[in-house]
Image: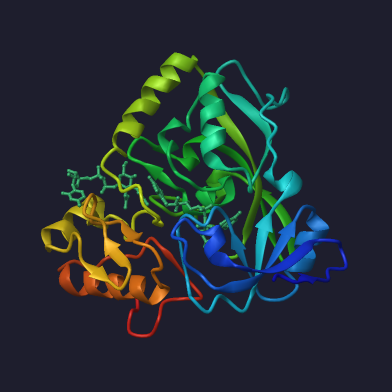
Amino acid sequence: MTALLPSRTGARVERLPLARFTTLGVGGEAEVWFVETHAQLAEAMEVPYRILGGGSNLVVADEGVPERVVRLSGPFAERDLSPDPLLSTPEQLVTGWVGGGVPLPGLIRTLQKLGLSNLEGTVGIPAQVGGAVWMNAGTRYGEMFDGLHTLEIVTPQGARQVTPDDLGWGYRQSGIPRGHIVTRVRLKLRPSTPEAVLEKMSAADQARKGQPKMKTPGCAFKNPGGVSAGRLIDEAGLKGTRIGQAMIAPEHANFIVNLGGASAADVHGLLALIRERVGVPLELEYELWPGEAEGHGA
Ligand code: FAD
Ligand code: EPU
């Protein structure tokens, strides 16, 4: 039974198991705020909160988290891809606002059909736009910041608009502090053809063929100095290693998969084991909620 909790701005608030919102399928309960307006978002941010995107990079504790969990909904999950007449040129189309809660895979497929290029390298990333921007998710074929024109960021102090030049972004980082919410963005895209975009997309799609199909939050560690962390973990002989119901994927050693009923503790155990066995310091890519367990420091 989930109980509806009160909000004075009319946000839908429910205690829900976060396992339902994560691609790993792990995580206990929290108070989830489904916000559709800036007023609802401001209310949600009055006390400690976290922002949940597509849950595709999260390992949430079995106990859940004590903070409010904000989920962008309604207009924050809608997109306006029509060209902004004031900002667009024949060489560069700048869209209307695309909500942070918009699922990235559907957006990328639509842009391909429209023959709009710049973001096709992110095909196959099961994120929401806001989460993908916050991480600057990508592949060697391209990343989110290739296609960003303007970002709206909301903090408890209010909303502001920034451009990529205002941020210190790079490989798997946007420079946006944790907890600053990317509510919507304008995309900058290069007019091309559906066929040409599809061709570029196929290369990125192809690189994914060797990735596991099970429940997972994707790659556990960032690639140190451009070397594949997966290769390093593989060379340490760890593919297929299990703790409880979590396993280092036999297909790609940087993925941890849930065999069914895994706990967050199982995943933490594998992360610690990898760090112990791989001779190179590895920076975590997964976000651990509420934080890393003692003894598993980054
Ligand atoms: P979540 O997992 O929900 O959250 C991750 C972090 O982003 C949290 O700190 C959260 O608070 C923050 N966040 C979420 N939404 C917002 C917002 N609106 N504003 C501010 N902060 C926010 N990643 C890659 O980079 N490249 C890949 O090729 C790739 N492949 C993947 C394949 C699979 C099968 C899976 C499961 C994952 C893969 N990932 C990949 C990892 C993941 O998709 C990315 O890290 C993505 O950016 C996470 O976005 P999300 O919306 O799911 O965020
Ligand atoms: N390799 C191994 N063993 C493994 C895994 C990889 O030997 O277990 C080797 C491969 O054979 C290849 C090289 O390492 O020669 C690179 O592998 P891959 O092409 O899979 O790329 P990656 O660097 O391991 C990165 C991203 C992925 C992204 C792919 C495809 C990171 C941490 N990972 O993986 O992103 O999908 O490229 O572009 O940057 C993610 O971030 O969550 C993620 C899945």
> Residue 209 falls in which quadrant of the image?
top left
Q: Is residue 178 visible?
A: no
Q: Nearer the viewer, residue 31 or 277?
A: 31
- Does 159 sit above or below residue 47? above
Side (left or right) of 269 relative to 237:
right
Q: Nearer the viewer, residue 133 or 6?
A: 6
Looking at the image, how many numbered discs can be counted on the residues?
0
Q: Nearer the viewer, residue 71 or 242?
A: 242
- Percent position of residue 78, x then y: 70, 40
> Residue 31 falls in which quadrant of the image?
bottom right
Q: Is residue 293 visible?
A: yes
Identify the residue at horizontal 52%, vertical 32% (top origin). Answer: 108
- Does 107 sit above or below residue 298? above
- Percent position of residue 205, x then y: 35, 33
Identify the residue at horizontal 44%, vertical 47% (top origin). Answer: 137
- Percent position of residue 213, x then y: 35, 47
Identify the residue at horizontal 37%, vertical 20% (top origin). Answer: 199
- Percent position of residue 187, x then y: 59, 34
Q: Nearer the viewer, residue 17 or 261?
A: 261
Side (left or right) of 193 relative to 163:
left
Identify the residue at horizontal 52%, vertical 29% (top origin). Answer: 109
- Does 184 sit above or below residue 114? below
